[in-house]
Image (cartoon, rainbow, N blue to C red):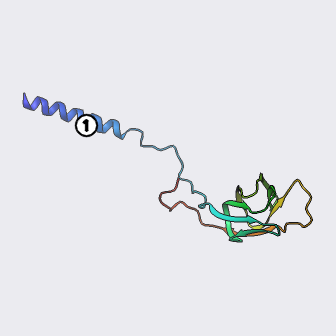
Amino acid sequence: MQSGRIRAVSILFAGTMLVAGCGGGSHFKNETRPPVPVQLTGVVTDRSVQISPSRVGAGPVIITVSNQTTGAHTLTLEGNDSTDTVGPVNPMGTGKLQQTLKPGTYTLKAGSQQASATEIMPGKVTVTRQRPNSSGDLLLP
């Protein structure tokens, strides 16, 4: 009687292992992941737009800009045949631009609906060669 139980448990275990092993052929390619996004910060003042760091490698970037003026502004990132806009960003508020940048020079402008006596000088970002991919980095989404 005991050997019958052992045989039944062995067959059940072998069947479970066989089923668990099915589907091992993956249909997903192991493609390289893009570089980790770089976080840039910016500020709009009455005189200029400043971005830090002002030099990054090509790849995904997230630019968070704080409007430190008394008026609302629309933020526009231009360069390398692309344009991205966010806004209007209210006074003391923040706006976020998210884009994959190619090598080149980009300009971040702050525009408003109201005419102003002085123009706000745009900020510049220089994008250099491509950053390394993030395929070897752990704990990334």
Residue sitting at the far top: 1
Which x, y percent locates residue 47? 83, 69
Decide if residue 124 is on the left or right side of residue 1. Answer: right
> Residue 125 is drawn in which quadrant?
bottom right
Q: Which residue is mark 1?
A: 14
Which x, y percent locates residue 61? 67, 60
Question: From where the camera sits, is residue 111 visible?
Answer: yes
Q: Nearer the viewer, residue 94 or 109?
A: 94
Question: From where the camera sits, is residue 86 visible?
Answer: no
Q: Residue at x 63, y 63 (%)?
A: 38
Q: Residues within 10 Å of mark 1 (few under 14, many from 20)?
A: few
Decide if residue 46 is on the left or right side of residue 141. Answer: right
Q: Residue at x 48, y 57 (%)?
A: 139
Q: Residue at x 68, y 71 (%)?
A: 53
Tag 1's secondary structure? helix
Q: Is residue 9 above or below residue 87?
A: above
Q: Residue at x 41, y 43 (%)?
A: 24
Q: Nearer the viewer, residue 2 or 78?
A: 78
Which x, y percent locates residue 96? 70, 55
Q: Nearer the viewer, residue 117 or 73?
A: 117
For the N terminus, the image quarter is top left
Kind of residue sitting beneath label 1: Ala
Decide if residue 6 is on the left or right side of residue 98. Answer: left
Decide if residue 22 is on the left or right side of residue 141. Answer: left
Which x, y percent locates residue 93? 71, 56
> Residue 54 is drawn in which quadrant?
bottom right
